[in-house]
Image (cartoon, rainbow, N blue to C red):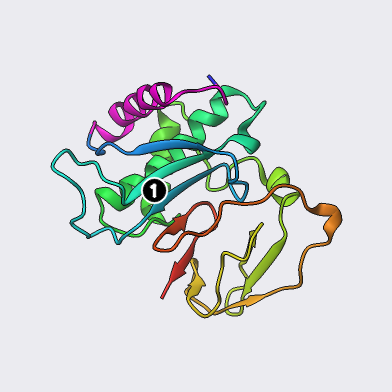
Amino acid sequence: MNTDASADDFRRLWADLNARYFRGALPPIDIQWSERLTASAGLFVSRRGPRSRSLDSAGEGTRRMIRLSRPLLAGRPPQELIETLAHEMIHQWQYDLLKRWPDHGAEFRRKMREMAAGGLRVTIRHDLHEAVRTMTRYRWQCAACGQTYERQRRTIQPRRHRCGACRGRLTALSDVPRSTRHAAAEPARKGFVPTGCQIVLPF
């Protein structure tokens, strides 16, 4: 299973990982291929805060979803798709069960170690860093801790976003040269808060 995976394939894989690593506690979530997501291999997206009461009685709703990058995962081993989905499911666990904004802190790392003990290699950063960098057009840097954020569109707004690591202020850096530019990125949608491998917090 790779980039030809269907919605049914995703549901079966998600259900297996949910049973193995989350004791079946995660509520259903929509999982989609994205042709335009190139900032990371996967992305957990939420419309509202984790304590919102917008889910229906079946635990499903449109407030959050998982997107997987077809351009970045194309031609990669099937295991990378599984590990990418598992990574985003940890973010879903943080959001749906812990009722916290997703991050890569202590709880994420604890769950990552549990998966490693079960034979699943999940990392903080997906192993597609160079592929992502070749598509980067814009960069921002935290004035406090120096963390940099890379995107293909100007989806980060320093006036309304802060660093996901320390909540410091972000400053736009110069554009990346055209020779390194390739595809476009996932567009920022009003009301969506993306939480992928490089997390930016609204304030």
What's the magenta region?
2-24
User: Residue beneath label 1, please?
Assistant: 91
Where, by quadrant of the figure, is residue 21 drawn? top left
Percent of width and height locating residue 71:
64, 37
The front one of 80 and 74 is 74
Percent of width and height locating residue 111:
37, 42
**Does the segment drawn in magenta span residue 73?**
no
The front one of 152 and 122 is 152
Instruction: Determine whether, in the image, residue 175 is placed left or right of residue 72.
Output: right
Which quadrant: the C terminus? bottom left
Dot 1: few (<14), some (14–19), or many (≥20) neighbours within 10 Å? many
The front one of 85 and 60 is 60
Q: Is residue 59 above or below residue 79?
A: below
Where, by quadrant of the figure, is residue 16 drawn? top left
Query: How would you classify the magenta stretch by its main secondary structure?
Result: helix
Number of labelled discs?
1
Residue pictured at 31% horizontal, 60% vertical: 48
